[in-house]
Image (tube, rainbow, N blue to C red):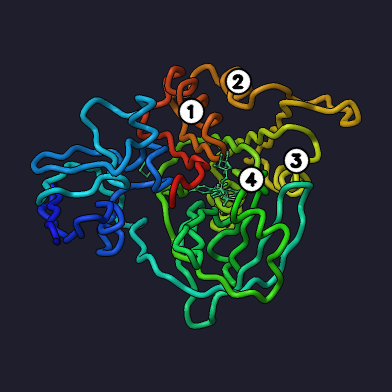
Amino acid sequence: MTYNVTIQANGQTFTVEEDEPVLDAAIRHGVPLPYGCRNGTCGTCAGKVVEGEYRYPRQPKAVKQGNIAEGDVLFCSARPLSDLVIDVQLVEEEAAIPVKIVPARVEALERMSHDVMLVKLKLPESQRMQYLAGQYIEFLLRDGRRRAFSIANAPHDDEFLTLHIREVPGGYFTHYVFHDLKERAMLRIEGPHGGFYLREESDRPIIMMAGGTGFGPCKAMIEHAIETGLQRPIELYWGVRSREDLYMGELAEQWTKDHDWIRYIPVLSEPKAEDNWSGETGWVHEVVAREHPNLSGYDVYLCGPPPMIEAGKKAFLARGLPADRLYFDSFDFSEGR
Ligand SMILES: Cc1cc2nc3c(=O)[nH]c(=O)nc-3n(C[C@H](O)[C@H](O)[C@H](O)COP(=O)(O)OP(=O)(O)OC[C@H]3O[C@@H](n4cnc5c(N)ncnc54)[C@H](O)[C@@H]3O)c2cc1C
Ligand code: FES
C-alpha cells in the first residue's frame, strides 16, 4: 500500500510505502526534510502531523527521553497509516543535494591513534559525490545494515573522501574496519546526508565543539572556510580523554599559526600523568560555557557523542544562543538499522 504525504507549507507531495519511514521516502523523492541520525535519537527530523495517522515500529529514543516538543513527530521513525499532511521546516535549497549510492574503493587505511582509523575512499571518476562541508555518508552493508560516518575533508579537495572512524568496543562494523578491512576493498556508500554543514551566508563568529572523531566534520568545515576565504572568527574546542586522542592536534595548531581568525582549544577530560598537560581539562562544554557566558551573537556547531551534544545544547541555549543558530550532528549508533 502506498500513501501520499503533503508538505503543508508548499503543497509538495510525495509517496511513501506503508512500512517505510516518511523521511526515507522524502530522501528518495528529493524532498529536503531536515535530519541527522536517521534513527530516532537526535530529534532533528521532528515536525507535526497535521492530518492523518502514523505509527512508530518502536518508540524512538528522543520520544522516550522527552527530547522533543509535545506533539512533535519524528519522521525518520514514523510510518504512515493513511495519507498525511505534515508541517516541517524544510532544509534550505543549497543543502538539498541529490543523494546517491556509489561504489567506493578503500584507497588507504591509516591508524591515527589507538582507536581512530583514517579511511580514505576513492569513488569512480564519473561518480564524484557533491556534498557540503560537514555532511556525512552511510555505508550500506550486505545484510542491509547502515553505518553513518562524517566526511572529514572539504568538498574542494574531493579526489578522495576521508573518514575518521573510532573503534567501538564490540561494534559490528567498526571492528571489521579495524581488523579485517583491506586496502582496495570495495564498499557501497550512500550520501551526502545531514543538515550539519557550514552556514556561509551568516556573518557571525563561529564556535565549534567537537568530541573525539567529531573533529572530522569540523575539520572539513574549517578547511572549507580557509579555502573560500571566509575569515569569520572560528573557535574550535576539541574534547577528548587524554593527549593521545588529539589525533590531529598538530594540524589544528597549524591552522592557528596560519590564520589569525582561527582559535583552537583542546580539552582533556582524563589527562594522564605522562601527558604533562597544562591546557584545559574537564568537560569541553563547560570550558566553552565558562569562556562564553553570552552566546547570543554566535553560530554554534556541535559534533560528537550524544551525551556531549545534549550537555552542550542545554548549556548553550541557557547562555542566550538562539535555537536556530545551534547546528549539531550527534554520533548516535544505529539502533536496529
Ligand atoms: C550522522 C552521524 C555521523 C557519524 N559520524 C561518525 C564519524 O565521523 N566517526 C565516528 O567514529 N563515528 C561516527 N558516527 C557514529 C558511528 O556511526 C557509530 O559509532 C557506528 O555506527 C558504530 O557501528 P558499529 O557497527 O561498529 O557498532 P554497533 O554494532 O552498531 O554497536 C554496538 C554497540 O556499541 C555501542 N555504540 C556503538 N556506537 C556508539 C557510539 N557512537 N557511541 C556510544 N556507543 C556506541 C552501542 O551500545 C551499540 O549497541 C556517526 C553517527 C551518526 C549518526
Ligand atoms: S531523530 Fe530523526 S533524524 Fe535523528
Q: Does the closest atom of ligand 1 sit within 8 Å of the Cβ of label 4?
A: yes
Vertical comparison of 22 with 192: above or below: above
Residue 245: image quadrant is top right
Which residue sits at x=75%, y=41%?
A: 246
Q: Which residue is mark 1?
A: 310
Q: Earlier in the sequence, mark 3 or mark 4?
A: 4
Q: Quadrant of ligand 2?
A: top left
Q: Is residue 313 above or below residue 98?
A: above
Q: Is mark 3 within 8 Å of ligand 1?
A: no
Mark 2 closeness class: few <14, some 14–19, many ≥20 residues within 10 Å: some
Residue 245, numbered label: 3
Residue 20 location (% of width, % of height): 26, 56
Give the spatial CA distance, label 1 vs label 2. 12 Å
In-image side of 149 versus 54 (left or right): right
Mark nearer the N terminus (1 vs 2): 2
Q: Secondary structure at mark 3?
A: helix
Q: Amino acid at mark 2?
A: Glu
Q: Earlier in the sequence, mark 4 or mark 2?
A: 4
Pointer 2: what residue? 286
Of label 3 and label 2, which has the lower sequence position? 3
What's under tag 1, amino acid-wise?
Answer: Glu
Q: Secondary structure at mark 1?
A: helix
Q: Residues within 10 Å of mark 3 (few under 14, many from 20)?
A: some
State which mark lies toward you, 1 or 2: 1
Query: Mark 4 Cα within 10 Å, few/some/many (few <14, many 20+)?
Result: many
Q: Decide: marks 4, 2 in contact (CB < 8 A)?
A: no
Residue visible at 18% across and 43% down in the picture: 54
Question: Mark 3: which amino acid?
Answer: Asp
Judging by the rendered image, the residue that carries numbered circle 4 is: 213
